[in-house]
Image: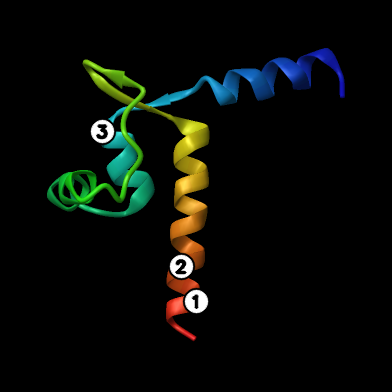
Amino acid sequence: MNIESEQNSTAKEKEFLKINDMVEKLGVTRTQFWRMRKAGEVPPPVIRNPQMWLASQIKEFYERRVKKEDVGTL
């Protein structure tokens, strides 16, 4: 791994998502998203004001969610 790819992977780990990004990524409405947050289905934000989530955490959450849905459809 070269220095440039290490820097890119570090930058991606520290990339943050705002609420609009979250809604788009998860494919839900804002209302559905807040219901999911209230139910504890979505990881808590790492920054509280404005609320922001780590992209790497959301990627892991999304992958687990997709796997769950795939298993449920079999």
Identify the residue at horizontal 28%, vertical 44% (top origin). 23
- Residue closest to the far left: 31
Alpha carbon distance from label 2 to label 1: 5 Å
Q: Quick check: 25 left or right of 3?
A: left
**Picture disc at residue 68:** 2
Q: Residues within 10 Å of mark 3 (few under 14, many from 20)?
A: some
Alpha carbon distance from label 3 to label 1: 28 Å
Looking at the rendered structure, the kind of residue marked 2 is Lys
Q: Which residue is mark 1?
A: 71
Q: Mark 3 or mark 2, which is nearer the start of the sequence?
A: 3
* Secondary-structure class at tag 1: helix
Q: Which residue is mark 3?
A: 19
Quarter of the image for residue 72 reads bottom left
Mark 2–mark 1 contact, CB under 8 Å?
Answer: yes
Mark nearer the viewer, 3 or 1 = 1
Looking at the rendered structure, the kind of residue marked 3 is Ile
